[in-house]
Amino acid sequence: MHSDTTQPWNAIVLAAGEGKRMKSPRPKVLHEIAGRALVSWVVRSVIEAGADRCLVVVGHGRDDVERELVKQFGERVETVLQKVQRGTGDAVRCAIEAHEDLEGRLVVLYGDCPMLPSSLLRELIDRTTKADADCGLVTATLADPSGYGRIIRNDAGLVQRIVEHRDCTPAERAIEEVNPGLYAFRARFLRAAIRRLSTDNAQGELYLTDAVGLAADAGEVVDLEGDMAKLTGINDQRELALAATARRREIAEQLAKAGVGIVDLDAIYVDADCEIEAGATLGPNVHLRGRCIVHTGAHIDAGCVLTNVVVQKNAKVLPYTVATDSTIGEEAQVGPFSHLRPQSTLGPRSKVGNFSETKKTSLGEGSKVNHLSYVGDGVIGRGVNIGAGTIFCNYDGEQKHTTTLEDEVFVGSDSQFVAPVTVKKGAYVASGTTVTQDVPEGALAISRPRQENKERYAARLRARLRKKKKP
Ligand code: UD1
Ligand code: CA
């Protein structure tokens, strides 16, 4: 490794803005792409690039932003508060003043550019360090540069300053080279430059971009060309949707390259933190959200929405299954139209069929809940068969209670279990039974009135009913 890259460097991510153009109640940097907040994409890139410390400037919606950062990165990230958003220069001032000890190189970037590759960050810091410059930045060229700060170069072709879109003269506005917002400063220089910024501009804010002009006045600014597709800052819902679509496609292609069967690359919604093994297959319109893990040979068919679900080897998830915080065992089969609510654990070769709902329930090896049932707060052993329309009455209006069905229990259709209740090994529950007491091992539980057949009664009954009918 080159000696330059071994110099520790720190990063400041600006994420205090409201993001008015999003027209959303959420702080802008918490909008998600492939299940990760914008700011988390940026911070991840910074950490991957090898930053020593990563400071994030928070302000608008700071509690939510801090919660997200702690969830994703724990102690790895430090936050700094910018109480009032007076511009990007002011945000950097807050970070620098809160950390007098910051020295060496400081990378500054914005929390709203989620496509940023860590390799570009490393290149920027390497080049700036090697040139021993006060400032280095990335620039990019755009056919439609509107909204971005423009790069003004001198006759020698060196970067001289940046002019914000709103402060541009018509001639400057025609410049297609823009500032994506990725800088590497010498900390000592930035500390001094920040004090010299003014609010004498169209927005009455302190612009970080003016620090680039100050660096150019004193020496050469290093610049390198970036690919705008990787550098777009998200300002509105359209840009968010475009970036999300691009990222989704990228994830789908990576999976397919790695050996995951994908029916339609444009109709697959896999969050960035999911792990899918080679040999798994995903049908069209499958959503894998949060942290799903799908093992080899598993097949997830059309329209399934799984959130934080583990799908073991060779399991089949049939169309339109919705599952959350659950595990589907090896060779198990779920769906079509099943609903696994949190803490459902399905054992190997078990089955949950159409219109069945499970919640906080473990289902042992080979057990089946095939049709139209609700099993909540259940402990179900191996080889248990639960007939159609069975209900675990787990809630008494105050508390939840457990239903336990031991190994090899058979439950006839349309039965109810009024929990807490236990059915011991191998017992048989007759159809239509309301189980309110424990059932001993091997016993038959039946709780229905005996049937009476009245011979030839049907015709008499019909005649009587017809007479009652109004003409
Ligand atoms: C900024 C740049 C512009 C560049 C563009 C690239 C400045 C003055 N302009 O403009 O040259 O082309 O990004 O996307 O820097 N923020 C704070 N505190 C504040 C203001 C902003 O933390 O007081 C944060 C925001 O949360 C956001 C980032 O800084 O993540 C950029 O702010 P934004 O308002 O989007 O800047 P642009 O107007 O896009
Ligand atoms: Ca922006």
Image: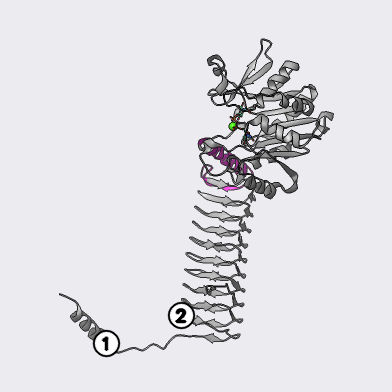
Badge 2 element: loop
Tell me the quarter of the image containing the C terminus.
Answer: bottom left
Q: Earlier in the sequence, mark 1 or mark 2?
A: 2
> In front: 238, or 380?
238
On whether residue 253 falls in the magenta region, the answer is: yes
Mark-to-mark CA distance, 1 and 2:
25 Å
Judging by the rendered image, the residue that carries numbered circle 2 is 432
> In front: 366, or 78?
78
Judging by the rendered image, the residue that carries numbered circle 1 is 457
> In front: 106, or 208?
208
Is residue 232 at least partly visible in the picture? no
Instruction: Name which residue type carries label 1.
Output: Tyr
Mark 2 closeness class: few <14, some 14–19, many ≥20 residues within 10 Å: some
Segment tinted magenta in the rendering:
238-267
Task: Point out residue 43 in the picture as x, y percentages from the top left corner.
Answer: 69, 40
Q: Residue furthest left?
A: 471
Task: Point out residue 402 in the picture as x, y percentages from the top left corner.
Answer: 59, 74
Residue that appears at 62% across and 41% down: 254
Badge 1 element: helix
Ligand 2 occupies quarter = top right
Instruction: Name which residue type carries label 2.
Output: Gly
**From what the image shows, is residue 382 above or below residue 178?**
below
